[in-house]
Amino acid sequence: MAHQVTSKDIPTKGEHLEKSRIAKIQRLSGVIGGGGLLASIIYLLVGSGTYHGSYAFSWLFAVFFILTLALGGCFWTFLHNLSNSGWGTSVRRMMENLGFVFPFLFIFCIPFLFPEVQKYLWEWMTSYDAAVKAHPEMSSSEALFHSSNTHDHLLAAKTFYLNPGFWLARFFTYFIGLGFFIWLVRKFSIAQDSDENPGTKNLFAARKHSSWSMIVFGVTLTFLALDLVMALDFSWFSTMFGVYIFAGSALNSMAVLILTGIFLQRAGYLKKVVTQEHYHIMGKLCFAFTVFWAYVSFSQFFLIWYANITEETRYFLLRNTENWNLVSLSLVFMHFALPFLALLRSDVKKNQKFMVALCCYILFMHIVDVYHMIIPERGPSVGLVVDHLPQLWIGGSWIGDLLAFITAVSGFLFFYLRNLSSAALYPHRDPRILESANLHN
Amino acid sequence: MSTKVRRVYGYLAEFKNASQLYKAAEKVRDAGFKKWDCYSPYPIHGLDDAMGVKRSILPYFVFIGGVTGFLTAIALAYTTQVGLYPTIVQGKPANIFTTAAFFPVMFELTILFSGFTVLFGLLGLMGLPRWNHPIFASEQFARVTDDKFFIAIEARDAKFSAEATKSLLAEIGGEHIELVEDDSE
């Protein structure tokens, strides 16, 4: 057996990420993220035409991708506290740091508040406003029933949820609510680091508050996914959709955590407290959520495919048309089958080089997954709004996707690095740190 | 006095606690024995390593079992639903591209075959079920389900010797060392 880690191996002040070592990359990501955000906001405010609409979708795709990573970080933090786990105490701070990116991401969501963006993304807002304006004497759902567009009748039954006022309230609640709870739970963990008499007070407080935080997380993730993505087509609905997003978030934030752990260790940190046993467990969680993602996404497809109800099939009909079908098929084989087979053996989960490659691959497939959720709606929506003619694909729009993606990921990286360097890299005074450092499974 | 010739099973030695058993196991492992085992009233963490037990080959069987189940499901669904008796459900095509309908069958049979391989593979590798075990001839061994810890080194082991093995067990802290004879004849 390897050397037993004792309290003598843990530095009393904890390990801190040296700010000078990441200053360059943090500044670079900050400049790209900040500059890109500013340019995007200006373009989304003043632009017009097909590419303007196209970029609104690019922005949603890019921002939703980084939102899922941060949401997954919240999930793992709350789960670790709530399940009273000891194995991951040495990697828990990374989970907290990843989750705490979430409230900062609000600034990337600001463009979704612009009517110039909303008119392309969420047609229900346009229909709602038009109906209410045309029939100011009626209630909103009655007004929609009187609309000449028969599709609006589907919206009439949903006005209790899909109305601009409630939408706005929800939008702010997500970030304030979950942002507060992840801040709170992380605060307990950090308070422990400088506690003169480190006891179990902070640990138990974190556990206690993780309970309702978990509920807030579940509600936030589900309805955020509904409001941002499912509402792209208000006539479509799927009860599996929130779980589907959750499965992808949990899987990919775990991939980010593995990558962070490996990179920090290569830079000389976490050497004493993180071993291959931790990577083994995190690899197992990746494996589990690869299967869970496949299970949930197939369940969603399968029920819709079998039932064959008009208002449900639209989502998959669009995504099985022409080249989108290739993307759909690639998700089956490359998002599920390949990682599933690759993660089966236990020794590969302990192989760091292999895990770096595989985690990057999993993240890439998650990009494809989010792309497949959002972008197929672009051609029909933007086509309708701008030229009154739905299209399948807007030529050249991928450039916007790439720019938005680089901007969002840089912004994400900036805040993630900020969180990583703002506190000790692992909770060195946690009562369970030695248990975690000597993990054996 | 019985004149029956009995086969020697091996030496059985008692240890006071889990920690002693653990340390003794490491020494028996280092002495190079292969056919021996530890007995304890409860599972001891890390004892596998102390005994030098290699990883089981069961996962490979399970993988083959799972693949067999998967292929069985494809063959079953394809031959019945496409070849022998195509049933048209909701106007869906009856060909191999109706894979979505076959997925639950593929999934279930993969799980079922894997599960069976785990169960029967495990029983096979452990040599279970069996009526009796030679070590039950020892009377003190009954307390292994209560509060005693034992190591038994089998006489079949190439390194076994009547004198040296006994003194090794005494050296590493074994008490009440007993030569167990198979009485199951």
Image (tube, rainbow, N blue to C red):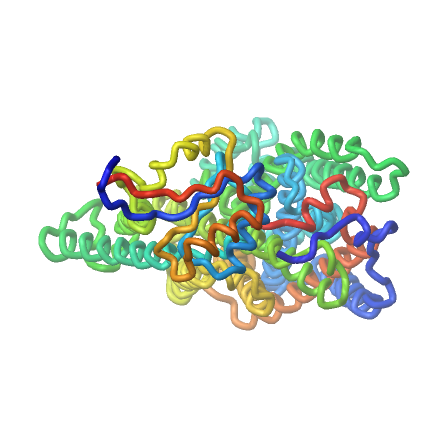
Residue A188 in the image, given as x and y percentages of width and height: 79, 37
Q: Is residue A403 above or below residue B161?
A: below
Q: Is residue A376 above or below residue A213?
A: below
Residue visible at 65% across and 55% down in the picture: A257
Residue visible at 47% across and 54% down in the picture: B165
Residue A59 in the image, given as x and y percentages of width and height: 64, 58
Judge by depth and name the residue closer to the eye, A127 or B63. B63
The quarter of the image holding the N terminus of chain B is: top left
Residue A68 in the image, given as x and y percentages of width and height: 61, 51
Judge by depth and name the residue closer to the eye, A48 or A406. A406
Q: Residue furthest front?
A: B1
The quarter of the image holding the C terminus of chain B is: top left
Residue visible at 49% across and 58% down in the picture: A346
User: Residue A49's quadrant in the figure?
Assistant: bottom right
User: Residue A341's quadrant in the figure?
Assistant: bottom left
Judge by depth and name the residue closer to the eye, A370 or A85. A85
Relative to B180, is B15 on the left or the right?
right
